[in-house]
Amino acid sequence: MKQFNDFAPLHFEKASNCLPFKIHTIEWIKENGIDLPNDYFMLIWIVAGNGYYRLNLQKEAVNTNQLLLIKPGQLHDLKFSSGLQGYVISFTDSFPDIEDYGREPVYTPIYQMFSQTQVITINSELADDMSDITEIMMKEYSRHNLYRAEILKRYFKIFLIYLSRQLESIEQAPKQSRNTAIFQNFMALLDKNFREYKMVADYADRLSVTPNYLNEVVKKLTGQPAGYHIRQRVAAEAKRQAIHPDNCMKKIAYDLGFCDMAHFSKFFKNTTGISFSDFKKRGTVLQPVF
């Protein structure tokens, strides 16, 4: 049996032709690790115990009945106390048809949730219902029976409906303002296009607003203009790739759309406050882990 310290590595490998949905207990993952490519969303539900997690190098506490939301490409690691219990659900957007807003409207707030939120506290009544659904998904996932994917998809939809009810109960405003909708659409576009589009004007054009207006809206809601979020998203991906020993600066710069190494090096230093080479040297202690 494999032995793990408090931190056990979360490996990212090429996806195989398998079900784009996984569900395991935290205990199972501590024993076995987990292999995921970079296009997976993750829901980590703590049902007992406490500990902390890091997301994009920011450390946060986590407690019982909290749900952590990690979207594709985010640099993350977790450290749990010895008695921590819970579940890790990972999936691609193709599994629950997240992008098909018209046919399955329940998924729209879930997708927006990943753009806005990192942690949700589940109330005890909903937690009991969600726990029942989760146990059914665990059993079905382990059986490998006929129509396994279809059954899991339907139970996962029920799980997300319960989660949507929790979101509705904590939503203060009954209806999104236009500015909030613009911001959410901007963040969704940014997650998908940050490699190609680096200018505020690129996103403003697709949102049918002016660059100045987009900057104003984003700054009003977050305290920082749109350009800041674009730079931070690119830098976060650069950091995520840099912690892997086989990724050199040239390879990362090319993947992120930089043609000039000097430009990328200057961007990295100005955005993160540390040179790429210095970050690379200390990167081995910041690898994504459980």
Image: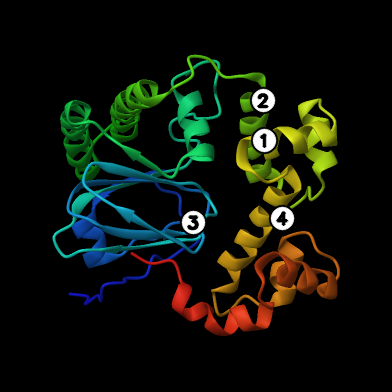
- Whole-number angstrom distance, CA of label 4 to CA of label 1: 18 Å
Residue 159 relative to residue 48: left or right: right
User: Which of label 3 and label 1 is nearer to you?
Assistant: 1
Asked if disc 1 and disc 2 are in contact, CB closer than 8 Å, the reply is yes
User: What residue do we see at 52% from left, 55% from top?
Assistant: 74
Question: What crowding class fits label 1: few (fewer than 14 Cα within 10 Å), some (14-19), or many (20 or more)?
Answer: some
Residue 179 - label: 2
User: Which quarter of the rendered picture does the C terminus lie within?
Assistant: bottom left
User: What residue do we see at 35% from left, 30% from top?
Assistant: 153
User: Which amino acid, by three-letter code, is at mark 1?
Assistant: Lys
User: Which amino acid, by three-letter code, is at mark 3?
Assistant: Pro
- Whole-number angstrom distance, CA of label 3 to CA of label 1: 35 Å
Residue 160 percent across, percent down from the top left: 35, 28
Asked where in the image residue 120 lies, by quadrant, the reply is top left
Asked if disc 4 and disc 1 are in contact, CB closer than 8 Å, the reply is no
Disc with the residue nearer the chain's start (3 vs 4): 3
Helix, strand, or loop for circle 2? Answer: helix
Residue 231 - label: 4
Disc with the residue nearer the chain's start (3 vs 2): 3
Helix, strand, or loop for circle 1? Answer: helix
Residue 195 visible from this viewpoint: yes
User: What residue do we see at 43% from left, 57% from top?
Assistant: 36
Asked where in the image residue 168 lies, by quadrant, the reply is top left
Residue 145 - label: none
Residue 113 percent across, percent down from the top left: 47, 34
Q: Which residue is identified by label 1?
A: 220
| Nearer to us in this view, 133 or 122 | 122
| Nearer to us in this view, 214 or 283 | 214
Residue 263 percent across, percent down from the top left: 84, 70
